[in-house]
Image (tube, coloured by chain):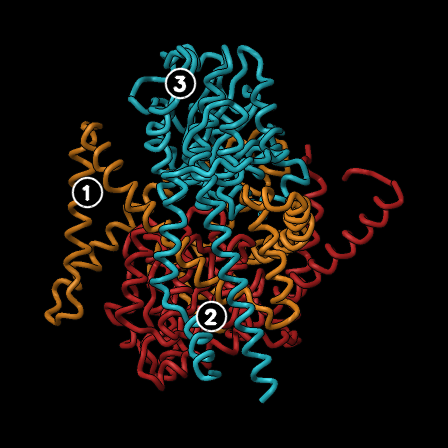
Chain colours: A red, B cyan, C orange
Amino acid sequence: MITNQNILITNLVMFGLLLFFMRKANAGKIPQIRQIAAVDAIAEGIGRAAEQNRPVFFFPGSVALESSEMVQTLAALNVLSQVAQIAADKGAVLKCVAGHSTIFPLMEETLRQAFLTAGTPESYKSDTLLWFSDSAYARDAAVMGMMHRERFATNIIIGRCYVESMMYCETGNFLGALQIGGTAAAIQAPFFVTMCDYALIGDEIYAAGASLSKDPVQLGSIEAQDIGKAIAIVLIIIGTVLLSLGIRFSL
Amino acid sequence: MEKKNRGILEALEYVDRRILYSLMIIVVAVPLIHPLGLPMPISSFTRTAYNAIEALKPGEYVIWASDVDAGAWAECGPQSIAFLNHLFRIPNIKIIIVSFIPAGTDLVLLALKEVDLHDKKYGIDYVILPYIAGGETAKAIFFSDVYKVVTLDVYGTHLEQMSIMKDFKNVNDISIYTGVVSPMTPLEEYIRQLVLPYKKPLIVGVISVNVPTLMPYIKSGQVTAYLGGAMGAAEYELLIGRPGSGLAQADSISTSHLMILLLVLMGNILYIIKRVRGGKK
Amino acid sequence: MSLIRRREISLALAAIGGIIMISDYFINVKAIKDIAAMLQSWGVILAIFCIFLSTGNLVIYHVQRLSRQTKEERGWSGLVLLVMSLFVGTYLAGRQDLFNILFNAIYLPINQAIYGIIGFFLITASYRAFKVRSLEASLLLVSGCAVILKNAPIGSWLWEGVIPIGTWFNEVGGLGGNRGFVIAAALGAFSIGIRVLMGLQKGFAGEAGGGE
């Protein structure tokens, strides 16, 4: 009756870890997350934008709501919530572009809630959140044009991007913007690492939102993820040793 | 003299982008007009893909998925044409063409204009299904029961009226799942919904940037073989003996890659000179 | 707040749906499989309705911008183009020949041109990034050059040894890194998925981010 037992066991173990560490963090034992340079740079970049009187650009990736990679967009929205609050506190103008029409309502709600929390609901203006097209290339052309016109001081591009990672980063580089990028997609990470001043690689994008918000639940889940990774490392080492000794078995 | 040299060095280090872009246009365009004809090795994965399709037996079903968008067509288009030329050449196999990306169906119709159909009849030997919305969910349902997500073909004809659909109800009825996948479609969706539950061989054409991310699935055997970018298409065209736009691009790829390497080399030499000069001071 | 708009209802629906779909993967019981198949069908319909939702949202958004008087906030172009494309798409539903012209002569070349810009950006990006500034940058330079040469026929024409070296970087060096990525990203995605299903994911759906 039970299928895929090995995956079920893995999931149950991870679920247990998540529950345990989230409860532990909620009870007050909040884990310490190492300093991630890109996360610190977000606040620095927004402050820089406020000083230079130039706007901040945020892009959460271009996947649709029904996509399986939507989790990266959720992580980006976590960061967006904090970016909006920091921008409202420092008096910087924030401009966001929705990567897909189905993400637009989510981003709108995130921004409105964030500005409300910061005590400046009027910060949400009609041009704070824009949508150009679901066609990736049409949007990319529009955003590159917008970058040239608006002269953003800081570009924050976090989430699942496709070709736009290179286009936005190169354009931002040409215009002298501070670039902060991040993705959990292996295919795009090299572009962010080489072209951005600060990069969030892999699951650092999930940690970024937790680190900025200091939310105990998110911090607890980061700790659980790290334990999960440690278990994976141990299993890989054991598997490598066993395979080297010629011992094979399948799970 | 040193001041003049420093001027030249700085000019080379901060060369105007427009000069670089113009050089790139020349370097890409010239081989398209006057091909160099460089010899081309064929990768083992391209051969595996070719052999897998060549081994198809009469009566077997193959799904061809056109999950490519217009931007990636430059690389995936030649792959599509080469793949389809090969599939249509195999006698008496049944080809189900599907797309889970909006532009995919239109692009496959475009590709079929350049494919030799070898007297294969529509509705009997091959059928083109319309775009199926819904991403991974749609894939999951399609693979379990085709008629739950689609009942008409791309021209509006009922599938039940077609003889090709008599023995095809779900993905268990196929021998190979093949297609081109642009970055817009996460390959992991196919791994989760097709390979793991149904254990079907998966052969994909991807853009060259996607190749490193494909490696874990190739090494674990979840993806049987792949074509990597326009070079993969060129290799496949050589194998099937039908030169096309993939081979035409091969020389341009060579010259443009060489140009990038020479620029990188120049940039590093200038950087080292600058550091040495800075160290001497 | 009315019963329908309570956040707990939407969270409960999401949680129930998620539990059923997860159970379908692990438990081979016909009743669960049937319910899961039904939910999957609903998911496809919801995905299509999302397009209507987002289109409606965008129409409202652009109409509000149109009603403003200031030059910077006038956004007529987006709304006009949206209506035009709806009209064209509806009118062309039965005119495949006209649609083919629009697709092949306008949509396809423009998309390919924008995609082709990457080739130019690649020059400036690699010119800037591939420098021997540090050990990591030098490793990046060597591996990048090896793979670039391996991917182009001219590489093997210049020196045959470039193929095994480039292949090693692709199939061994890069493989390890990609596997690490896949594992780490999957754990992160799992964590967010569980938080969404348990209603602990903050930042939207009526609750501000930041530990509230």
Quadrant containing the C terminus of chain A in the rendered view: top right
Q: Nearer the viewer, residue C20 or B200?
A: B200
Q: Residue A171 in the image: x percent, y percent?
A: 37, 65
Residue B136 appearing in the image: no
Q: Secondary structure at mark 1?
A: helix
**Residues under labels 1 and 2: Cα distance?**
37 Å
* Relative height, residue B151 to residue B234 (above, below): above
Of tags 1 and 2, the one toward the viewer is: 2
Tag shown at residue A180: 2
User: Can you identify the residue that label 3 sits on?
Assistant: B116
Number of other residues with Cα within 10 Å of mark 3, as a class: few under 14, some 14 to 19, many 20 or more: some
User: Is circle 3 on the same chain as circle 1?
Assistant: no
Query: Are the numbered discs 1 and 2 placed on the same chain, yes or no?
Result: no
Seen as rendered, the residue at the extreme front is: B1
Left/right of residue A250 with respect to residue A210 in the rendered view: right
Question: For the residue marked with disc 3, what is the amino acid?
Answer: Asp
Describe residue C80's horizontal placement relative to residue B23 as left or right: left
Q: Residue at x 63, y 66 (%)?
A: C138
The amino acid type found where label 2 is placed reads Ile
| Residue at (71% x, 62% y) in the render | A227
Residue B237: numbered disc? none
| Residue type, numbered disc 1 | Leu
Which is more toward the observer, A170 or A106?
A170
Residue at (54% x, 59% y) in the render: A190
Disc 3 to disc 1, C-alpha distance? 36 Å
- Looking at the picture, do discs 3 and 2 lie on one chain? no
Q: Chain of mark 2?
A: A
Residue bearing the label numbered 1: C86
